[in-house]
Image (tube, grey):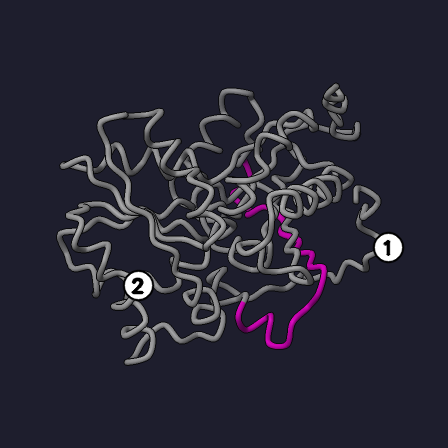
């Protein structure tokens, strides 16, 4: 007999205006900073609390069970800090753990799969859509399902591009090496006649230039971060949770990592688009690892 799902875990009660609570964002490492970058652009008044599980990156080659466990633990951590909204800024976690998180936690949340799929369906002309991402994201079929739910007439071609992640983190965004790797990965996709390609990993916007150059001007790139945060704005507004922007001052930003890799500030700053100031290493005893 299957056990019933656990009761929802509510966000902790905090004093003050609910609108003043931060948006929580988590990712397997630093790629989710491209999503935070979109929050800073589209919702500059909002406070942001980011958790990067850099000690256990990557998620893209791990099992469903492991990704789900890690995602539950990350969510617990963010809820302990009183977030009002959760953004799963990881394609693999969005694909494999979103349903489990929605069942377990009573907090509004969004992943990056559905907004990216919706943007692609809206922008394609020939209903042939490509998706590039980690092995876990592509094998999950999450984008195929999301696009089919929106428009069953669309066909979807997925290609795993695992080497794009280390290239982005090393800053190898130009030159012969990233271009040759992009050509090898993308050549089969180009033969399918797709007219839109979803960047199905939050690292990939860092390589947008070389990817666009290889695909050519007739193929539209879909950045899931842009569409995801546009949806976040709509949902916060509908729930009357948008933070007032009376002062014109930007919201606060706090960044937590389960490990701080060498050169993180340099690499993370490139993903975020500005210098990272408030950075905290979270010891394992401070994260609810008991979920395992």
Location of mark 2 (residue): 185
Q: Which residues are magenta?
A: 246-267
Q: Helix, strand, or loop for circle 1? A: helix
Report the front residue among 158 and 284: 158
- Tell me: residue 240, above or below residue 217: above
Q: Nearer the viewer, residue 141 or 220?
A: 141
**Total marks placed:** 2
Residue 228 at x, y = what percent?
44, 38
Q: Which mark is residue 285?
A: 1
Q: Secondary structure at mark 2?
A: helix
Identity of the residue drawn at 44% across and 53% down: 201
Q: Residue furthest front?
A: 1
Residue 83 placement, left or right of 123: right
Foreground of the two, 273 or 140: 140
Q: Residues within 10 Å of mark 1 (few under 14, many from 20)?
A: few
Dot 2 and dot 1 residues touching (CB under 8 Å): no
Quadrant containing the N terminus in the rendered view:
top right
Position of residue 276 relative to residue 250, above or below, is below
The residue that appears at 45% across and 27% down in the rendered structure is 234
Among numbered discs 2 and 1, the one appearing first in the sequence: 2
Residue at x 19%, y 35% (from the top left corner):
127
Q: Determine crowd level at label 2: few under 14, some 14-19, many 20+ residues with C-alpha closer than 10 A.
A: some
């Amino acid at each position: 007999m299957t056990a019933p799902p656990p009761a929802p875990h509510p966000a902790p009660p905090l004093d003050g205006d609910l609108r003043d609570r931060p948006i929580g964002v988590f990712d397997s490492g630093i790629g989710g900073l491209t999503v935070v970058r979109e929050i800073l652009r589209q919702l500059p008044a909002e406070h942001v609390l980011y958790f990067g599980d850099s000690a256990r990156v990557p998620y893209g080659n791990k099992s469903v069970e492991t990704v789900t466990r890690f995602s539950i633990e990350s969510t617990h951590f963010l809820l302990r800090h009183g977030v009002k909204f959760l953004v799963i800024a990881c394609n693999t976690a969005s694909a494999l753990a979103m349903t489990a998180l929605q069942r377990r936690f009573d907090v509004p949340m969004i992943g990056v799969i559905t907004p990216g799929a919706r943007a692609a369906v809206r922008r394609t002309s020939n209903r042939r859509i490509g998706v590039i991402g980690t092995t876990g994201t592509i094998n999950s079929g999450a984008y195929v399902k999301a696009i089919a739910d929106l428009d069953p007439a669309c066909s979807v071609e997925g290609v795993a591009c695992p080497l794009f992640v280390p290239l982005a983190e090393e800053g190898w965004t130009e030159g012969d090496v990233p271009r040759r790797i992009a050509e090898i990965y993308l050549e089969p996709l180009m033969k399918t006649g797709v007219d839109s390609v979803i960047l199905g990993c939050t690292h990939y916007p860092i390589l947008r230039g070389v990817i666009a150059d290889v695909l050519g001007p007739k193929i539209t790139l879909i950045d899931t971060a842009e569409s995801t945060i546009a949806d976040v704005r709509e949902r916060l507004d509908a729930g009357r949770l948008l933070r007032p922007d009376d002062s014109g001052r930007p919201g606060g930003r706090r960044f937590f990592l389960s490990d701080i890799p060498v050169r993180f500030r340099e690499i993370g700053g490139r993903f975020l688009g500005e210098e990272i100031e408030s950075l905290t290493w979270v010891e394992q005893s401070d994260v609810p690892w008991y979920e395992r």
